[in-house]
Image (cartoon, rainbow, N blue to C red):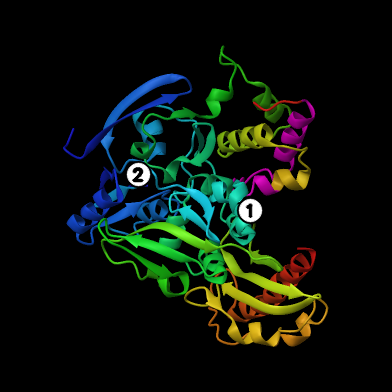
C-alpha cells in the first residue's frame, strides 16, 4: 500500500467487498482484477461498447469510465446478480438463452443489465424500435441484434424485468 | 487499459477544490461525472497527477426558478435535467438538449458543469446555453464571477475558466410567453457526437416570427449564434421560413471519418430550418 492508495468497500451482488488499491483504478479493474468478479467485460475503455456495464446503486454505468474510489460505499450489481439465489439462470437470462440472444457472449452481461434497467423503468410498453434505441449504447458484433430484441420483447410480454 | 497512475482526491467544498487545483499547478483536473475525462485518461490523451472529485460537495446541485431565471447547480446530471419538472417548465430547450447526450449510462453520471467545462464544440448543452442566453457562475473559492455562455466557450475544448476556477452554477433565462423552442440533431447513430445540432428559440405573434435566437454545434470551434439568419426570418411563418434561409455563413465545418465538411454544411441549413420551424410551431401553440 502506498500513500495514494484508497480503500474502497462495495456491496457486489449482495456481498460486502473491500479492497485497497491506487485511486486511478477503474471500477471495472477493481471488480475483475481485485475482486475476481469477471462477468463485466473490458471492450473499448471509452464507455461506448457497453460490455462493462454494471448497475451502480441500481443505475447502469460503464465500469471502465468510473473510478472505484468515486463510488465507494455503493451497491454494485453485475449480470451474475440477475441469477437465481441457487446460481441457476434468472428469468431474463433464460429468455436470452431461449432466443439464442448470445453467440460469443462477450456483450451479453452488458445487454442483460441494460435490458433489465429498460424493462424495470418502462412507463409504457416498449416497441421494437424503443428497445433498439435504448440498446444503442451496447454493441454486439455477432448477432445483428435481432435475437436480443426478440428476447427482451418476450421478457416484456411475460412481465419479466430481471 | 493500462492507465498511468494518478492520485484521487475528494473536495469537500469549492474552496477546497480551488485550493487543490492551485496546488496541482496544472497537473490536476476536476473530476465530476468523468464521462469525457476518464475515457481521455484511459486513452492516454491526458497526463495528469491528480483528479479532484467534486461530486461530494454539498449544496451544489440545486434546481430552482426565481426572478425569471432557472438556477441549476453544476453537479446536476443530464438524466436529472431530462426529467426535472422545473427545468421542463422553465426552459424546455435545456431538457431537450440533455436527452441527446450520449447513452443513458452517460446521462446518469455525466454532469451539466462537466459538459460545459469540457466544451466539446459538438456538445448539446453548451449550444443550448448559448442560445438560451445563459450565464455561468465561476468560483475560485473566495470570489465568484459571472460569465456569459457566449464568452465562456472560446474554442475547441477551451473556456475562459482560470486554472483554479470551477463552474459552480448556471443561470438560464426562463422561456417567456409566446416563445417556442426547437432542437434538431443528426449523428451517425443515436448517442454519437452530433455531426451538427441546431437549437432555436422563437417569439411568435399572429403565427409569425417576431424575434429569434438560433445556434449550431458541430460546425465551428464553438457553439455559434447565427445572427444573419435570425434577422432573415423575422416576419416569416412556419411555411415561409425555409425560403428565407440560404447557405449558412460564418461556420467552419471540418471533414473527418464521420462526415465531410460539405455534408456538415448541408446539415447546418437543414437542421437550422427544422429547429426554427419546430420553435415557431410550439410558439403558436404556446
Going 56% across and 47% down the picture, which residue do you hit?
B79
Q: Quadrant of residue A117?
A: top right
Q: Position of residue B143 (x, y in %)?
A: 27, 61
Q: Residue under label 1, please give it.
A: B88
Corner quadrant of residue A26: top left
**Residue occupying the far right of the picture:** B239
Judge from the rendering whether residue B63 lies leftward or rightward of residue B168; answer left or right: right
Please state, as top left, top right, bottom left or bottom right, where the N terminus of chain A lies in the image: top left
Q: Nearer the viewer, residue B128 or B103?
A: B128
A133 above or below A40? Answer: below
Identify the mark at residue B57; answer none if there is no mark: 2
Q: Position of residue A95 (x, y in %)?
A: 71, 27
Q: Position of residue A13 (x, y in %)?
A: 48, 23
How far from the left and from the top, in percent, is residue B146? 38, 67
Q: Secondary structure at mark 2?
A: loop
Q: Residue at x 21, y 54 (%)?
A: B19
The stretch of residues the image draws in magenta is A133-158
Amino acid at each position: 500500500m502506498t500513500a495514494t492508495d484508497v480503500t474502497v468497500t462495495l456491496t457486489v451482488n449482495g456481498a460486502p467487498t473491500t479492497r485497497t488499491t491506487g485511486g486511478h483504478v477503474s471500477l471495472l479493474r477493481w471488480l475483475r482484477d481485485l475482486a475476481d468478479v469477471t462477468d463485466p467485460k473490458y471492450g473499448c475503455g471509452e464507455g461506448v461498447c457497453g460490455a462493462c456495464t454494471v448497475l451502480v446503486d441500481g443505475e447502469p454505468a460503464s465500469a471502465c469510465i468510473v473510478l472505484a474510489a468515486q463510488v465507494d460505499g455503493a451497491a454494485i450489481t453485475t449480470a451474475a446478480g440477475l441469477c437465481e439465489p441457487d446460481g441457476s439462470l434468472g428469468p431474463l437470462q433464460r429468455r436470452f438463452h431461449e432466443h439464442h440472444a448470445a453467440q460469443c457472449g462477450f456483450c451479453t452481461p452488458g445487454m442483460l443489465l441494460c435490458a433489465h434497467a429498460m424493462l424495470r423503468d418502462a412507463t409504457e410498453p416498449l416497441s421494437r424500435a424503443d428497445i433498439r434505441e435504448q440498446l444503442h449504447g451496447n454493441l454486439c458484433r455477432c448477432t445483428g441484434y435481432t435475437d436480443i430484441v426478440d428476447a427482451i420483447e418476450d421478457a416484456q410480454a411475460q412481465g419479466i424485468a430481471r | 487499459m493500462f492507465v498511468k497512475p494518478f492520485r484521487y482526491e475528494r473536495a469537500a467544498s469549492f474552496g477546497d477544490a480551488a485550493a487543490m487545483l492551485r496546488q496541482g499547478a496544472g497537473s490536476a483536473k476536476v473530476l465530476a461525472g468523468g464521462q469525457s475525462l476518464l475515457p481521455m485518461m484511459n486513452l492516454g490523451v491526458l497526463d495528469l497527477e491528480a483528479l479532484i472529485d467534486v461530486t461530494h460537495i454539498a449544496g451544489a446541485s440545486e434546481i430552482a426558478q426565481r426572478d425569471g431565471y432557472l438556477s441549476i447547480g453544476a453537479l446536476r446530471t443530464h438524466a436529472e435535467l431530462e426529467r426535472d419538472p422545473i427545468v421542463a417548465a422553465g426552459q424546455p430547450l435545456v431538457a431537450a438538449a440533455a436527452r441527446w447526450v450520449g447513452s443513458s449510462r452517460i446521462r446518469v453520471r455525466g454532469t451539466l458543469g462537466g459538459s460545459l467545462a469540457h466544451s466539446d464544440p459538438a456538445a448539446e448543452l453548451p449550444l443550448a446555453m448559448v442560445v438560451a442566453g445563459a450565464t455561468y457562475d465561476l468560483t475560485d473559492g473566495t470570489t465568484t464571477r459571472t460569465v456569459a455562455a457566449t464568452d465562456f466557450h472560446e474554442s475547441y475544448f477551451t473556456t475562459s475558466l482560470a486554472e483554479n476556477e470551477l463552474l459552480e452554477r448556471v443561470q438560464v433565462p426562463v422561456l417567456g410567453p409566446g416563445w417556442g423552442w426547437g432542437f434538431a440533431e443528426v449523428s451517425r447513430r443515436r448517442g454519437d457526437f452530433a455531426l451538427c445540432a441546431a437549437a432555436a428559440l422563437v417569439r411568435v405573434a399572429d403565427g409569425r416570427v417576431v424575434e429569434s435566437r438560433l445556434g449550431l454545434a458541430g460546425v465551428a470551434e464553438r457553439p455559434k449564434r447565427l445572427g444573419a439568419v435570425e434577422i432573415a426570418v423575422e416576419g416569416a411563418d412556419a411555411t415561409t421560413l425555409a425560403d428565407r434561409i440560404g447557405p449558412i455563413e460564418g461556420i467552419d465545418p471540418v471533414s473527418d471519418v464521420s462526415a465531410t465538411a460539405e455534408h456538415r454544411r448541408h446539415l447546418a441549413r437543414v437542421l437550422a430550418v427544422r429547429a426554427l420551424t419546430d420553435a415557431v410551431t410550439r410558439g403558436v401553440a404556446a
